[in-house]
Image (tube, rainbow, N blue to C red):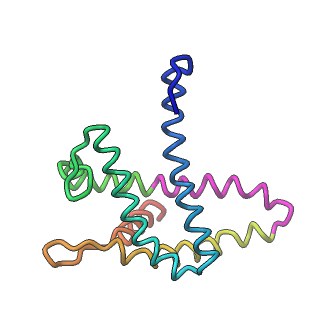
Amino acid sequence: MEFSPKAGKELLICWIVDAFLRTIVHYGYWLKEVEYQYGMGVTLEIEKEVGETSFAIQLNRLAKLLNIELQNGMPAVLYRIDEKQLVELLDTLSLNWLANDGVWFQAVIPVFRRNAWDVLLIPPARLVLCVAIFSSLEPGCEKHDGGVATRPLLRELGHHLLVKVC
């Protein structure tokens, strides 16, 4: 795709943000389709490899282009931030996750207004599905530091979500 000066910088920035969103959506469609074809167990096994490989490819490509230093496969700036700020970052990401769920839920409710019982079924069914999926993904998120297992990311994220909700 070639950039046309007539399009303007603002439009180009919108395309860049849209490309990020479409990459996330496309990843989700792959998960959904593989789960449909082969079941959740196979999907989660494949996702372990795909997630790590895809993230590394994308991060390395962006880091090279934007001259971002990497450390242990992550943006080095994260290692220079103190723990308090990292917790604040995790809190913000947790709130974004909740906001995303809320936006989706509010968008789906009008679709199900034709049958009020469907609306009542969404939250428990969704919660069970999310817990099942994230519980299955959690072991792949565990990192080791000097041979000592640290708290898995999703458990930590869940903790921050509960703190914000309760």
- Point 56% across, 17% down: residue: 6
Assess whether residue 104 is covered by the magenta stretch.
yes
- Point 54% across, 53% down: residue: 99
Assess whether residue 62 is covered by the magenta stretch.
no
Question: How far across and down, in percent of the image, does residue 154 sit?
Answer: 39, 69
- Point 74% across, 58% down: residue: 109
Asked if 75 appears above or below 66 in the picture, the reply is below
Asked if 33 appears above or below 55 in the picture, the reply is below
Question: How far across and down, in percent of the image, does residue 7 sit?
Answer: 56, 21
Quadrant of res 125? bottom right
Q: Is residue 19 left or right of residue 59?
A: right
Question: How far across and down, in percent of the image, does residue 33 sit?
Answer: 62, 69
The one of 65 and 162 positioned closer to us in this rendering:
65
Residue furthest to the right in view is 114
The one of 3 and 63 positioned closer to us in this rendering:
3
Magenta highlight: main SS = helix
Residue furthest to the front in view is 2
> How many numbered discs?
0
Asked if 48 appears above or below 63 in the picture, the reply is below
Per the rendered image, the range of residues in magenta is: 95-116
Q: Is residue 55 left or right of residue 42?
A: left
Residue furthest to the top in view is 6
Question: How far across and down, in percent of the image, does residue 84 sit?
Answer: 24, 53
